[in-house]
Image (spheres, rainbow, N blue to C red):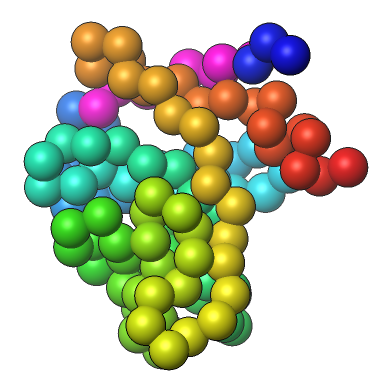
Amino acid sequence: MDMNWIAIGDISDIPLRGARCVKTPQGKIAVFRTAESEVFAIEDHCPHKGGPLSQGIVHAKAVTCPLHNWVISLETGKALGADQGEVRTIPVRNEDGALFIALESLLMAAE
């Protein structure tokens, strides 16, 4: 199945160790940039109490939720440590700084 890649801006729009939100028909997606300029996209709500992960602190390949300090892997979407839960990860492409997310995966996951 072909992915439907949607342009979401440039990597320079996201500060190092920062995030920005993208609104989609399936909800808000948080797009993160690590200190090494790797880019990840996950649902913008913590599996614990729905905290805005996009406002959390990015460290290595994880983000700490600003509400209750849950740590979520940006690679897998799973809570790290003793916490249980996960959010969906969304495929991201970086083409010379231009960022794209795969909307098809969101549509499939929503069915």
Query: Relative to residue 17, is residue 6 drawn left or right?
Result: right
**Residue 12, horizontal then vertical, whole percent:** 19, 28
Q: Quadrant of residue 40?
A: top left
Query: Residue at 24% across / 67% down in the picture?
Result: 57
Q: Which residues are magenta?
A: 4-11
Query: Residue at 38% across / 61% down in the picture?
Result: 73
Q: Quadrant of residue 20?
A: top left
Total numbered circles: 0
The N terminus lies in which quarter of the figure?
Answer: top right
Residue 55 in sight here: no
**Residue 7, horizontal then vertical, whole percent:** 48, 17
Vertical position of residue 20 compared to residue 105: above or below: below
Vertical position of residue 67 compared to residue 26: above or below: below
Between 53 and 76, the one lying in front of the other is 76
Q: Is residue 7 shown in magenta?
A: yes
Residue 95 in sight here: yes
Query: Relative to residue 100, is residue 28 drawn left or right?
Result: right
Query: Residue at 53% across / 47% down in the picture?
Result: 89
